[in-house]
Amino acid sequence: MPGTYIPTDYFPVLVILLIASAIGLGALVAGILVRPRRPYAQKLTPYESGNPPIGEPRSQFSVKFYIIAMLFVVFDVEAVFMYPWAVAYDKLGIFGFVEMMLFMFILLIGYIYVWKKGAFNWE
Amino acid sequence: MDLPITITLMDIRAIVPELTLICVGLIIMLLDLVVKKKDLVALAGIAGTVLALFGTYKLYGVTDTQFVFSNMFVLDGYANFFKVIFYINLILTICISIKYMEIEKSSFGEYYALLLFATSGMMIMASAADLIVLYLGLELMALSTYILTGLMRKQPRSNEAAIKYFFLGAFSSAFLLYGISLTYGMTGTTNIKEIAFAISTLGIADNPIMYLGLIFMIVAFSFKVALAPFHMWAPDVYEGAPTSITAFMSVGPKAAGFAVMGRILMGAFGDMQAQWVTVLIPLAVLTMATGSIIALSQTNIKRMLAYSSIAHAGYILLGIIAGTPEGLTASVNYLMIYTFMNIGAFAIVIMLRSKGFQGENLDDYKGLAKSHPVAAALMLIFMFSLAGIPPTAGFIGKFYVFMELIGSGYTPLAIIAIIFSAISAFFYLRIVVYMYMKDAEQEIVLTQSPTMNIALAVTSVMVLVLGIFPSFLLYFVRYSIMGY
Amino acid sequence: MTLQQIYFGYFATMMTIISLLVVSRKNPVHSVLWMLVLFVHMAGLYLFLNAEFLAAVQIIVYAGAIMVLFLFVIMLLNLRKEEKEFRLQKQWPVSAVTAVLFLVVLVSILGKITVLPELGEYSIDMINAQGSLMTIGNVLYTKYLLPFEIASVLLLVAIVGAVVLAKKRIE
């Protein structure tokens, strides 16, 4: 029945998650409890290799980052489609091969387009 | 386990028109990288569309409904007829945009490729026999139109339009998906035919969850066809988008939205007709009221035509409310007529746009009849048709829809529609009055091009011919929808 | 209370709380980080639904790629003034009323949900025996072939959109 499934295979993952969070949180909490706390202005400024910090830490990013990230997402999704295809390839055979080639061909044209438009150049 | 690989040549044959458009779109993308003259790219787009049209013409011989790709895709006269509407829309849009995009300094090859992809998305929607295919087609169409809307990056209003369209479009997609998932949860399938079967066999037509799923889907489609109260985006987006895209958007996505509405409501939710009719009637009345009344106070012609297209969506919806195959025939007939008259009107709007002159105010039409009698006469035809005055096609379209509505027993609704139709005549005729009875305030230069003239000739002739000899289109529609 | 109810209850409650945290943070970067936690919880819920591949994709694509995109866009917009302002728009009472009404609708139909008998051949046992990826691969590339190929065109349009709208044009 739907809704009766418990992913028991993933129990070790849960254990690792719990241990990892416990270690991370434990280190932070232990630090707070153990370390002496005597703040003053110089100590609280961000460390900039000895120079006094200039301006805000957050600055405006260029739109170029966005294009790269967007293209990354698209090709990431493309790659995700290949996992089940690769696993089921034995059964799909040549039929599946042609199908995936068609899929990749369409995105290849996108790749050529992006390349020729110079979106990979960092100008 | 054996795999159900059953792709035959017939399956491929069924999607030849879509394949053609997508392939030509890909070719255009590559062509754009090497070709400097964008007219050539546009012509390639028109050639590709004609090719796809030929493919659909070849498939028209297949009168019996055919399901291909594991019942994902359906080929029937209904889908084919809508595809013809999309082709006409696409060809006319390309014709009116070549010169215009140059003036707007936004003449890119991608523009034509995206138009083709958007159209193939609409075609997939019209042929979808499964809600997943339908959703993908819808997103293909929507994503392309969002980009096209924001194509004029230097203009803030184009950006604003694209953002608004995108946000509200994403919101409506979420509604669609929620509706699909509720329906899937209750029926255990996303196939339109199997949903209808499940509703009748499981006896869940009265189940409130089905009702909720149905309403969510109606909300999503209402957004796409701009029914009030889901029309808020339309005026801003229509105003901000490049005018050629406004023409494209006011026909294509609307027709595609009605295509899936007809298929889902009558195909999948046929047993729940009583439920969806009670939802659609207030929507239709509100839509006609909003479109006709708010359009009265507009001073920008693109905004005015946006409200006009909202009102028209209300009239088209009436045929679906009638709930009979004849009602659907009337709606589809109306959509075809609407395609010609609306694109024709936008073509005139585009002609007024020249270098350094926007030409979007109603005042710009003052005295047009004296300086440019032909353009004014054409605009007169389109305005008469949009208002539904005989002997133009617009009258025929409305006439059949109202007839079917009365035939199905919704006489009060038909009377309301006629009243709003009379109200809307006011703002259409105001333009005619401006053109013929006022004096020009400034000199208007019309931007002409051969393709534009062809588009205008085709649309105006069709509006008149269909107005005077309406039966052959109606026969064609009836023949197409037969057996649906 | 069964183990299933505890499992689902935890994820459902946490997702609601985290979603509220996402929309109520003043600093958009904090919102994005909460969204990361939200995505991980969503993946947990997918696991519960016997959709292992989807859970993995949720982490790879959403928590990986989409998150980066979100952060880039926030840095791109560089919202400084907005962070200090009152976050709710002036029409929030309308939204609140609509949301409450919607909640009422949903709660009122809650009892009407009928759990269908298992339909089709894809039972939990069958998927577990075959493996989640294998099952998806067998279905996606045969029955759902057409949607799969349409998806590639959709991705292509996304690429074109990113380049057309954001790339500096060589005039």
Image (cartoon, coloured by chain):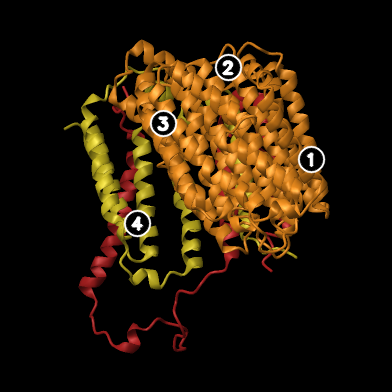
Chain colours: A red, B orange, C yellow
Residue with the mark numbered 1? B454
Are the residues flagged by discs 4 and 2 from a single subunit? Answer: no
Q: CA distance from mark 4 to mark 1?
A: 56 Å
Eyeballing the image, is C137 above or below C43?
above
At x 34%, y 39%, the residue is: C45
Are the residues flagged by discs 4 and 3 from a single subunit? Answer: no
Q: CA distance from mark 4 to mark 3?
A: 51 Å
Question: Nearer the observer, disc 2 or disc 1?
Answer: 1
Are the residues flagged by discs 1 and 3 from a single subunit? Answer: yes
Residue with the mark numbered 4? C34
* Amino acid type for the residue under numbered disc 1: Ile
Q: Is residue C60 visible?
A: no
Residue with the mark numbered 3? B416
Chain letter of the residue carrying label 4: C
Residue with the mark numbered 2? B4
Q: Position of residue A2 (x, y in %)?
A: 32, 25
At x 56%, y 18%, the residue is: B71
Question: Nearer the observer, disc 1 or disc 3?
Answer: 3
Q: Of helix, strand and loop, which one carries label 4? A: helix
Are the residues flagged by discs 3 and 2 from a single subunit? Answer: yes
Between disc 2 and disc 1, whose residue precedes?
A: 2
Eyeballing the image, is A121 above or below C37?
below
Would residue B81 be found to the left or right of residue B311 on screen? right
Q: Is there a contact, CB below 8 Å, between mark 2 and mark 1?
A: no
Q: Position of residue A25 (x, y in %)?
A: 28, 61
Chain letter of the residue carrying label 2: B
Q: Of helix, strand and loop, which one carries label 2? A: loop
* Amino acid type for the residue under numbered disc 4: Trp
Would residue B337 be found to the left or right of residue C49 on screen? right
